[in-house]
Structures are given as structure tokens and as C-alpha cells.
Image: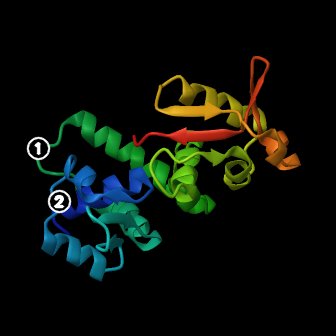
Amino acid sequence: MPEKFGAPERAALTVLMLENRPVRNTELGDQVKLTKPGREKLNKAGFIQTDETVKPMVHEITNEGIAWCLQDLVKGELPPRSTSHARVTFGLLKKFILHHEACGTLIDVIRSRDLESLIRSTYEELATEPQDWIRLARIRPRLNGAEKGEVDATLVKMMKTGTVHLAPESNTKVLTAEDHAAALRVGSEDLHLVAMEES
């Protein structure tokens, strides 16, 4: 049986596993109340890593935390007085987990990310300040081999939100072959740069 943690710690692990990215403490607090002793307990167990050098602090689940969380879902108990729908859903979730565990694909399923999230996190890694203009040629190679057409469609969708901005490089003399290949064509214009507002 997995080590016992209280409901707030279990909920925090589940939220961090579902987010699959570094999560600000304030953002985590919108969904679950993780106390300082609970946070310290999870860090000591090696299930999360908390970066306290930034404000607000940031939490990220480890592979060990994911493994514990999944075992807790498979072997853990539902809260008393759970509805029949919750019991059936929990049973289905257990089957899903056990199937992927048997196939050796469980961590891949949990660690996979949708393309938009991957583009955003790559942008955040490369940007040195908010709304920094980053070349698409620097972003595309970091997208796990995603097809250019799929990335283009996702960028256009993101642009329509009004929080993602794409622009051409005004000084065309600085463009490399990589810049030309990575450009997003919209109408008759090639866009080489992207800037994102904080989401």
C-alpha cells in the first residue's frame, strides 16, 4: 500500500501530475490548499521539487511523485460515501492505469503534452522578459519533431486568442536559411518572430 498522505497532499500531487509543468504556488492554491508541512513532506519524500528562490515559489512533480500518485489511485481507497458514478469512474481509471503500466507506456502518457502547452513552455524557456520576441527558428527544433503544418495551425489558433503575436523580421538581411524554413506564412507574409503575453 502506498505511504499515507492527507487529502491535501494527494490532491496537490494529482493537480501537479495533470498540469505536468512547473506550477506557481498561487496557481496551485486556486485548486488545493497545500500547507507548508504538507509541502515539506512531499519534497522530503522526493515526490515534488519546490523552487523557493522565486516568488511565488514554484512546484513540479517528479517521476517518483507520478509513480506514487498512480499507485495511490490504483491501490488507494475512495472517500467514504462516494457516489456510484465516482466508484465506476475510479474503476475505469484503475483499468487504464494498469493497462498502460503493463505496456510500459504509463509515464509517457502522463508526461505527454499538447502542442500548444509545449510551444508555450518552450517560449517561456527562451524568453528573457515578458513578451520578448523569439525567432520561430529557435522554437521549432524543440517541439519533439512536431510536423510544420501542425505547428503552423497551432500558432494560428494561438494568435487568434489575442495573447500570442507573430511578426515578420523587419531587417530581412539578418534572416538565415533556418529563419526562412521556420517562418509561418499568413497570406502573402512570412512571420519569423513570436511574442506571448503571460497566460
Q: Looking at numbered disc 1 in the image, what kind of residue is underneath it?
A: Arg
Q: Residue at x 53, y 22 (%)?
A: 160
Residue 6 spot, x, y in % from top left: 16, 65
Q: How is the image coloured?
A: rainbow
Horizontal side of residue 26 vs 154, given as left or right: left
Residue 46 spot, x, y in % from top left: 36, 79
Q: Count every numbered label the image shows and give the total.
A: 2
Position of residue 146 relative to residue 84, above or below, is below
Q: What kind of element bears circle 1?
A: loop
Q: Looking at numbered disc 2 in the image, what kind of residue is underneath it?
A: Pro
Where, quadrant-wise, is the C terminus in this rendering? top left
- What whole-number distance in Å separates the C-alpha atoms at marks 1 and 2? 18 Å
The one nearer the camera, 146 or 75, is: 146
The one nearer the camera, 186 or 58, is: 186
Farthest bottom residue in view: 44
Label located before the other in sequence (1 or 2): 2
Residue 127 spot, x, y in % from top left: 53, 54
The one nearer the camera, 16 or 168, is: 168
Q: What kind of element bears circle 2?
A: helix
Position of residue 167 relative to residue 108, above or below, is above
- The dot on residue 81 is 1
Q: Residue at x 46, y 49 (%)?
A: 95
* Label 1 environment density (alpha carbons within 10 Å; few <14, some 14–19, many ≥20): few
Q: Residue at x 77, y 37 (%)?
A: 183
Residue 32 spot, x, y in % from top left: 19, 52
The one nearer the camera, 91 or 50, is: 50
- The dot on residue 161 is none
Kindly indicate whether the residue at mark 2 contacts the one at mark 1 (C-beta within 8 angstroms). no
State the residue position of label 2: 8
* Label 2 environment density (alpha carbons within 10 Å; few <14, some 14–19, many ≥20): some
On the question of residue 112 being in view, the answer is: no
Nearer to us: label 1 or label 2: 2
